[in-house]
Image (cartoon, coloured by chain):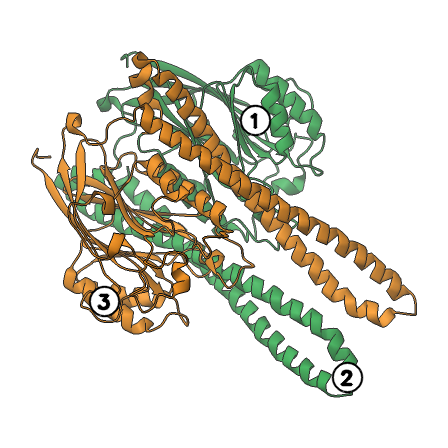
Chain colours: A orange, B green
Amino acid sequence: MKPNFCLRLRVFNLNCWDIPYVSKHRADRVKRLGDFLNVESFDLALLEEVWSEQDFQYLRQKLSLTYPAAHYFRSGIIGSGLCVFSKHPFQEIIQHVYTLNGYPYMIHHGDWFCGKAVGLLVLHLSGLVLNVYVTHLHAEYSRQKDIYLAHRVAQAWELAQFIHHTSKTADVVLLCGDLNMHPKDLGCCLLKEWTGLRDAYLETQDFKGSEDGCTMVPMNCYVSQQDLGPFPLGIRIDYVLYKAVSGFCINCKTLRTTTGHDPHNGTPLSDHEALMATLYVRHSPPQQDPSPVQGPPERSSLINVLREAWTELGLGIAQARWWATLAGYVIGLGLIFLALLCILAAGEGAREMAVMLWTPNVGLVLGAGAVYLFHMQEAKGLCRAQSELQHVLGRARETQDLCSEPQLAPLLAAGGQS
Amino acid sequence: MKPNFCLRLRVFNLNCWDIPYVSKHRADRVKRLGDFLNVESFDLALLEEVWSEQDFQYLRQKLSLTYPAAHYFRSGIIGSGLCVFSKHPFQEIIQHVYTLNGYPYMIHHGDWFCGKAVGLLVLHLSGLVLNVYVTHLHAEYSRQKDIYLAHRVAQAWELAQFIHHTSKTADVVLLCGDLNMHPKDLGCCLLKEWTGLRDAYLETQDFKGSEDGCTMVPMNCYVSQQDLGPFPLGIRIDYVLYKAVSGFCINCKTLRTTTGHDPHNGTPLSDHEALMATLYVRHSPPQQDPSPVQGPPERSSLINVLREAWTELGLGIAQARWWATLAGYVIGLGLIFLALLCILAAGEGAREMAVMLWTPNVGLVLGAGAVYLFHMQEAKGLCRAQSELQHVLGRARETQDLCSEPQLAPLLAAGGQS
């Protein structure tokens, strides 16, 4: 590769709010999105919440000349909602469905039915290996009482691990999506600390768009005050994150967001704002690499965030076990009640009532059984994430201890977070 | 690394048949397994079907001096049953739970409740990066009418993809486990073709053990004729597979299996036979690399197996949709019947019967709803694997077409399967 190698990447990201029977003006917005993407001709357009496969097929056809490569990530019952359109061919495709993703009985929230996931596309551009990740994490329905916090932290950890383990030969890593986390939220810090990904909004030389880079803003006619909770001016939960490794450097020349309207000042394309980033990847001799090996202060911030995530998952495990225990008691009481109903049915006095109550009680026992099994599985999933964190924490602590002996630091940098 | 570098790895693999309340002589077998592993002092002991976490903790304590590193992979409701004991520390740990793993209503088979998975441990040995995978796929309960075939093929594909994407910087890849597939089964061929893994039994210079390397044999007192189905002499479904990349070569000096007894001729350690392999990893200059780039004949066998897997998944999708449709009809009929019951209850004649039938009918509708959702999710999961296969197939075909023009072959080898 030439020493003056330079690659420009124009990237588009949008949570499309494309939910059949629920989202307003869906067909019109999808049509206008297609027109806009065709006109702008980005290198990559990454979309979330495309929960209608028909809409994906419509876009695929409409964009086929400008974006010859396209992929829809299928998962769960409804689907992950993730899809990608690209000017450049995909070399490889894989996806990972998050182990934990809310509760099936929270039907009105619906996340569990989607099978939220992270999709990976490997592209080869001018000899450069580019790993593109697109994801959508569990929504936050209440900031004050967020019952999904442990699940979102576990998802952020799975996402970070997936990126860490699948990007070892990538020159450039790009992650776009709706993380449903504010920039300083625990899961967001965990993801950035463990992968080394940098936030385009914080790094760009030239930003134009909504105030503070918010991606849900009150000016958007599809956004209600309830969606913004205690942040009436808007929230930033959609991201373009990136890093370069092995002798390359990447920077974000410009970052644009829509501002509650369609890019041409019409009705917005979605209830989220679109992100449009222009990234430049350049050759960078190893000694000029802008991502130096982490020294003790950075390691200590990694350790802090790992410890905090470990604690949060611990609270989630306790909660899951509490629900499983409660369901266990309900099963026990239901079985005792069933036995009593059998005795009553054998007698004469209350036979009719006993027979009437038999079936609802069987339903109760079966329902409680399902709840018990679900929360046992939830506890196992959280324990799994916690034990992986525990392992990383142990290794990070070892490295930190040994880094205090300067002659050992280079030896350890290779074995720790890479 | 020295040119005469040589690393010896002694590996043990066993499906332990450690199922609380079900498996015979469990405590005694686990104790004897611990004693044996301590005496033999392998580099790595990979175990499947350890479905009691207490037994893992017992082994962890018992083996702590010989195998200081240990990990238990938690998932699903019961657990993946996978665990690893190692003489050498783990640098990194991650696991992937298979998207499809049987049916929750097949309670007597139980696989769905386990959360079958693949676990990965990254080890650094004398400067060499070793990726160790351990897995257990869905059981085969009937060879003649295998209702889980599509799921097992999808699992084999997910396993192959997980290895492919997470081992790109590994020098040596080792996969052990109970694949529940015979050596020439579709899933097994798919796994080997896509990852390039080689079978220790077929490659070893020195094999001693059960006839044809079988890992379930009739001499084992825990094995019934039913377990062996149409193979009364035994089946080979547990494997040690490996490959070396980037300037290393690996070979299997010896492979031993138990032969229906404990290694000291007592009661067997499990209903499966243990595998004990001695592997040697040597430095190999690139030109002597024993895994040459795949030429057209190998590509054509890859294309054939991809095509066959694609077809098998297609049959699975049709079946899943059939069940979803059937469940849809049951829901429809159940709702009509509920409406009729409402009318009857409003009248005088059959009010009592209508009230009696109301709750079971609601149960039927809810049950059919759950079946519908499950099979919709199954179809999505199979479609996802099929679309990944389709993509690889497309790329492999392109490569094959271009490989027929010899001057283009080297160019393509880098972009295809690596």
Q: Could you say which is closer to the camera, residue A159 or residue B392? A: A159
Three-letter code, disc 1: Ala
Q: Could you say which is closer to the camera, residue B396 or residue A115? A: A115
Three-letter code, disc 2: Ala
Counting from the top left corner in percent of width and height, residue A367 is at: 66, 58
Which residue position is annotated with label 1?
B274
Is residue B179 visible from the viewing direction of this image?
Answer: no
Precedes in sequence: disc 2 or disc 1: 1
Residues under numbered marks 2 and 1 in contact, where contact means CB atoms less than 8 Å apart: no
**Quarter of the image that includes the N terminus of chain B:** top left
B386, above or below A341, in the image: above
Is residue A318 visible from the viewing direction of this image?
Answer: yes
Counting from the top left corner in percent of width and height, residue B213 is at: 52, 29
A162, above or below A300, in the image: below
Question: Is label 2 in a helix, a strand or a loop?
Answer: loop
Mark 1 chain: B
Q: In the image, what residue occupies the spot 62% across and 23% down?
A: B33
- How far apart, in angstroms, are the residues tagged by discs 2 and 1? 65 Å
Q: Which mark is residue B325?
A: none
Mark closer to the observer (2, 1): 2
Q: Is residue B213 left or right of residue B382?
A: right
Counting from the top left corner in percent of width and height, residue B383 is at: 40, 57
Mark 3 chain: A
Residues under numbered marks 3 and 2 in contact, where contact means CB atoms less than 8 Å apart: no
Residue at far right of view: A348
Mark closer to the observer (1, 3): 3
Which residue position is annotated with label 2?
B350
For the residue carrying disc 1, how many other residues have a C-alpha within 10 Å: few (<14), some (14-19), or many (20+)? many
Which residue position is annotated with label 3?
A262
A111, above or below B337, in the image: above
